[in-house]
Image: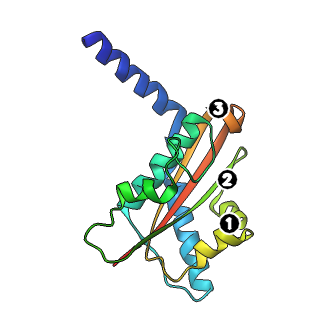
Amino acid sequence: MLVALVSLVGSALASSRSATSLQPLSHQVLVSVNRFRVAHGRGVLHESEALDRAALRHSLEMGRLGYFSHNSADGRQFWQRIRHFYPAHGYSYWAAGENLVWASSGLSASGAMTMWSSDAPHLANLLSRQWRQIGISAVGVTRAPGVYGHRRVTIITADFGVRR
């Protein structure tokens, strides 16, 4: 039993070394999103810890399992994953949106914004008047498998939400 526990802890530590949260980049993306919104006559979005957790879980999962999709690895649609962290109960209206981006050579907040703003669905999320909150997770993954080709990558997930 103790051996199994030590093995599990060792595996978790090994996994955590290959994927790390890039908090400063996450914050820079938040600032960039809000600057962009204000420049286009939209209100600022408030950071939500619940949406931050949803975004982090998704960024880490994509990096660990080597896929890039709004759907989760288990096939759930993005809004189902987000709802787990950002529940709808107790509210008469709930909605969520998501922007994703990744790059194998250094990804900056301005780079993420450039990619998102040049794609109609991502731009629509950035400028939507319905969103009130946002959660952002930037992670760095060393030797990411699958679609990432075992390269060092940066993955950013931005989850948008509103509850009222």
Name the residue tied to disc 2: 107
Earlier sequence position, callout 1 versus callout 3: 1
Per the image, label 1 sits on a secondary structure element best described as helix
- Which corner quadrant of the image does residue 18 belong to? top right
Measuring from the top left, give residue 48's x and y in whole percent. 38, 65
Residue 51 visible, this orientation: yes
Identity of the residue furthest to the front in this view: 75
Q: Amino acid at mark 3?
A: Pro
Name the residue tied to disc 3: 145
Residue at point 60%, 49% (across, down): 155
Per the image, label 3 sits on a secondary structure element best described as loop
Q: Amino acid at mark 2?
A: Leu
**Is 21 displayed left or right of 152 in the figure?**
left
Measuring from the top left, give residue 44's x and y in whole percent. 48, 80
Per the image, label 2 sits on a secondary structure element best described as loop
Q: Which mark is residue 116?
A: 1
- Residues at circles 3 and 2 in contact by the CB criterion of under 8 Å: no
Q: CA distance from mark 3 to mark 2?
A: 18 Å
- Which corner quadrant of the image does residue 9 belong to? top left
Residue 136 visible, this orientation: no
Earlier sequence position, callout 3 versus callout 2: 2
- Residues at circles 2 and 1 in contact by the CB criterion of under 8 Å: no
Front position among marks 2 and 1: 1
Which of the image's four quarters has the C terminus? bottom left
Vertical position of residue 80 compared to residue 11: above or below: below
Q: For the residue carrying disc 2, how many other residues have a C-alpha within 10 Å: few (<14), some (14-19), or many (20+)?
A: some
Q: CA distance from mark 1 to mark 3?
A: 24 Å
Q: For the residue carrying disc 3, how many other residues have a C-alpha within 10 Å: few (<14), some (14-19), or many (20+)?
A: some
